[in-house]
Image (spheres, rainbow, N blue to C red):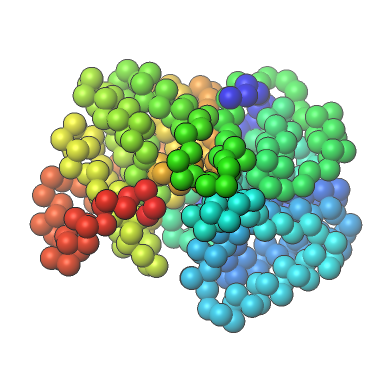
Amino acid sequence: MRTTQATSLVPLWNRQEEWRRRLAMIAAARDFLYASTYYLEYDQYGTEFLDALDEACRRGVAVNLLIDGFGQTLGGVLMTDEATRALASRLDQLRQAGATVTIYRPGFLIQRRLGGGQHVKIQVSESAEAIFGSSNITASSFEHWHEFSVALQGPVVPVLLESYRELGGAVDESHLAQLRLTAATGSESALDYWFCNPNLGQGRLGPLGWRGTNEVTDRMVALMDGACTSVKLTAFYFKPIPPLLDAVEAAARRGVRVEVYHSHRDALDATDLAWIAAAATYDRLLETGVHIWEHRNGEHSKIVLVDDERVSFGSYNFEDAAHDRLAEAMLETTDDAMVAAARQIFDELAADSAQVAVTPTFRDALSPVLRLRLAVMRHFKRWM
């Protein structure tokens, strides 16, 4: 964990507000621009993003783009073969224009085969502002699913860029030095930055048999253990590793009101395996008093609000892959404005008509085939 500060924290819950801010940062860049993503889709958002990076290169901006190899392959099932080829061509053109385009793949074959990669989304320029959160560069993130990012200024900005190299990207030391000098100072809000790339600490067996620690998971467990009255959280699909699941259940048993907002099985067209892995723990969660809602359009934000007084946000999904295969990062703060923004988001989620409450009889609405698949596939939760 690293303690740092921000002089400005701007919540970006509105999808188009975040998109405009991302493009505005690229348009204003004159020196350097760094951006990391898990997946870039060759749709209207991907092409607009690449167009903006092309234009930045023509201005002489040092453009650095980091895309996760496994994430791009996984998300690539949403694209046609023609779109996949077009994206590869555009990335080559971007390299030829002088940009550094990196496709991150962990060092060992088993890591790559089992989905090892980086899942952190950071965008930084010499403006000394960073955008940090859950969004990928795709219409899913900006038109369909809920996402949450934050625009930050202050000492936290170079801290985020420092971690870019641990995600597999290259960072120019002069750019870091420039950010350290120009990072805004003044009234500052304290932040804790949690970051872990488990791939860096694994051997040739990758996550198989790995018993290393993950700072982000550990901090999540500590949040649950320290909760006194309430925990409200969002996730893509809620399927945490056993120690974190145990901590959530323990909180509910001691009287903490735990609310989980995640995605409905229909929110992901490509497969329902992620939902099955989440549904595998529904019975035990409901028995302990955890309240669960599924959003029909998709919940992809990662927000944890504890006792209405501290909030964390970033890229960490509540899943096994976030613990032992993917680089993840979260920021935590007790900043009053950020906590108020999180409260408002959860109030909005609770009132959303697209939310479906999960009840102990949820299986009754499933087809016999889906009930059978749930009974069988739940044993493979770690890999879904």
- Whether 251 is drawn above or below 39: the answer is above
Q: Is residue 99 left or right of residue 356?
A: right
Quarter where residue 258 is shown: top left
Q: Is residue 375 left or right of residue 13?
A: left
Residue 227 makes an appearance in the image: yes
Residue extending furthest toward the bottom: 82
- Whether 309 is drawn above or below 300: the answer is above
The residue positioned 55% from the left and 65% from the top of the image is 73
Q: Is residue 128 left or right of residue 309?
A: right
The residue positioned 85% from the left and 54% from the top of the image is 61
Query: Residue 48, percent across and down?
Result: 66, 66
Query: Residue 26, percent across and down?
Result: 74, 53
**Which of 119 and 295 lies nearest the eye of the viewer?**
119
Quarter where residue 163 is shown: top right
Query: Residue 260, percent across and down?
Result: 31, 39
Quarter where residue 43 is shown: bottom right
Query: Residue 281, percent across and down?
Result: 24, 43
Residue 24 makes an appearance in the image: no
